[in-house]
Amino acid sequence: MKNAAFVVFKKELTRFFSDKRLLFTTVILPGLIIFLMYTVMGEAMNTSFNTDDSTFDIAVVNMPDILENSFESERYNITDINTDDINSIRDKISNKDYQLCIVFPEDFNESLLTYTTIEKDRTVPNVEIYYNSSDIQSSNAYSEAVSILSSVEETVSNVFDVNRLDSPDNENIYDVASDEEASGLLFAMILPMILMVMMYSSCVSFSVESIAGEKERGTIASLLITPTPRNQIIIGKVLALSVMALLSGISSFLGTILSMPMLMGNMEDAVGGISAEYYVFSDYLWLILIILTTIILFVTLISILSTFAKTVKEASSLVMPLMIVVMLVSFGSMYGTEAKSELYWYAIPVYNAVQSMVGIFSFNASPVNIGVTILVNLLLSSVGLLVLTKMFNNENIMFGK
Amino acid sequence: MKEILKVESISKTFKLSSKQQKVEKSNSKTKTAVDNLSFSAYEGEIFGLLGPNGAGKTTTLRMLATLIKPDSGDAFIDGSSIVKNPDEVRGKIGFLTSELKLEDFFTPDFLFDFFSDLHKVPDEVRIQRKEELFSKFGIDKFSQVKVANLSTGMKQKVSLAVSIVHDPNIIIFDEPTNGLDVITAKVVTDFLEELKQRGKTVIVSTHIFSLIEKICDRVGIIIDGKMIVCDDLKTITSEKNLEDVFFDIYRERKGDEI
Ligand SMILES: Nc1ncnc2c1ncn2[C@@H]1O[C@H](COP(=O)(O)OP(=O)(O)O)[C@@H](O)[C@H]1O
Ligand SMILES: [Mg+2]
């Protein structure tokens, strides 16, 4: 004999998998959109910060001998000009034809040579640099020129260095954070929040449609006049909806985690190589279990709210407050990136999932805490299923006008 | 003759929301839709509930089909109580009313299989029954067309086929010809008579005199939720035709407010 819950489960999934458009918009699209969005964002940020291959036209008045070497690069087109030409160059900078105009005082060479640290109160020579902050090229040239000049100034008056990079490839040996830890910190900050919100909204879209939608269209009554026990109908539905939401959630998750390295590419120097490759199998297993049980809980809660509603529209507004709670709790994880260690935190639904995920992403997964989270989720879902069964047996809720 | 359906003074009162009060043009916060109703139906007959709109026919049938529970009283379908053993009752009846819809997305073929599985019909039986019913109603040509794309008449025929996937002995049918074109209506009434030939018991509700006169063996006239007369059609119409009998009764109960 075919199990009734399985028959309902199969029907829901048949509906889902044979509707190509639904499948595309709920499973393929979310991951794809996230992936493309983050990749394009990362790409855009990279190009706007990346100046390596651009050349700058720079006009210089009174180029001092000791600086000629510093500006000797294929990327700098240096033109020597007179004080009289400054105005016309300034116009060109504002038209973005020129990037910079550097004006050294006439006696710059001498003042550097005669400089001593003892003469504290004499006025030091001023180098003027004209640039155009509304032009990215000019701004970049400006910051490069400033850093060249500052380093020259430092060598003239050097008293001490901080974190001098001596190695040939300028590798930062002072930041002791490994790439692994940097990835962990970043993922722990961002992913739990994104995942929770994604999960909730995909649970909403499936459950509201399947429960309130069937009520509104009158198809649920056709199910209710069959001898199928109510709890079997509910279990079949909740499990099928959870599978759909899980697929949609996995899609968003893959999109996020695969595009993260590209989004963070430009911050390479600051945080090192971001990658999901540092997580091991058990991390992913825990993660899937947390996600699955949280999804089951979400689907159950949303189904309860949807059963109270008479229409999809009404259900959509009933589930909004819960969405806000989920968002607030999840956003909390962006601060305090340490996962809570005390067990009692893990008895609080939603919060426990966020904390467990923070733990997993920051390489501090605690099996006990995660186990409690999973148990609490399943326990609450079972209570929810009992409530749903009671509701399905209540004619005022199911057929009330 | 076996008394296969026995209704024992069932009542149903609905609470009215303020919106419903306006629709019903009533100041009362409640509406008694069915009031102490009793009747019986015998195996192998077609029993008709006749009454004007709002008389309580649909509410009565919904209670018999266990969608809603009576406030008081009980009914027994082939021995099973609609109050105490609703799951048992659901397995014994086929119920059809406009409230029950089929999911637009699926095909008649899929839905027939789905409801067969829910009724735990064995696969071989299901296949044979499906072929038989689909060819009888002309559904076979449309068996792979989504319900959304079927005509109203075809939808109704699919609903009918799906409601009897488990070959129930008692078929409860609310307003069987409502909204159907004359040809589909005839297919449906012919089928109800065929069910009777096969020994099934059919309960229908309607406000159409001719339907009762055409197919029913016995009839119960309901007004304001109360059973006024319940007897053999022949006995009731021995002197006058059904329409005249009905309006005599109606005038007697309601005065001249026709
Ligand atoms: N769910 C409900 N809530 C409130 N009133 C209802 C409900 N269902 C039916 N009624 C009222 O009960 C009365 C009987 O309705 P119904 O059984 O549908 O009559 P019929 O099928 O004979 O036309 C009507 O006045 C109707 O408005
Ligand atoms: Mg009716």
Image (tube, helix red, strand yellow):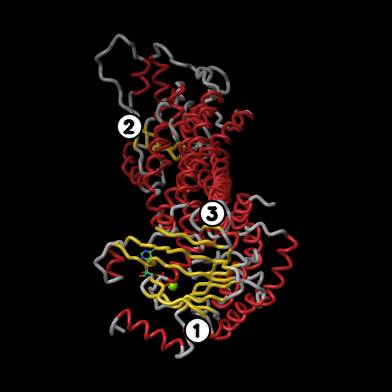
Amino acid type indicated by mark 3: Asn
Q: Residue at x 34, y 37 (%)?
A: A130
Image spot of residue A275 (x, y percent):
58, 32
Q: Of circles 1 and 2, which is in front? A: 1
Read off the residue under disc 1. Answer: B235
Query: Which mark sits nearer the N-terminus, 3 or 1?
Result: 3
Q: Residues within 10 Å of mark 1 (few under 14, many from 20)?
A: few
SS label for mark 3: loop
Q: Gap in Å between the C-alphas at discs 3 and 1? A: 35 Å
Image spot of residue A66 (x, y percent):
44, 22
Please determine whether, in this image, residue A40 is positioned above or below residue B66: above
Image spot of residue B38 (x, y percent):
45, 68
Say whether residue B73 is left or right of residue A118: right
Read off the residue under disc 3. Answer: B85
| Closest to the observer, B48 or B24 | B48
Callout 2 and callout 3 share a chain: no
Q: Gap in Å between the C-alphas at discs 1 and 2? A: 117 Å
Amino acid type indicated by mark 1: Thr
The residue sitting at the bottom extreme is B240
Q: Residue at x 33, y 27 (%)?
A: A106
Please determine whether, in this image, residue A3 is positioned above or below residue A147: below
Label 2: chain letter:
A
Q: Residue at x 66, y 71 (%)?
A: B143
SS label for mark 2: strand
The quadrant of the picture showing ligand 2 is bottom left
SS label for mark 1: helix
Labelled disc at residue A128: 2
Q: Of circles 3 and 1, which is in front? A: 1
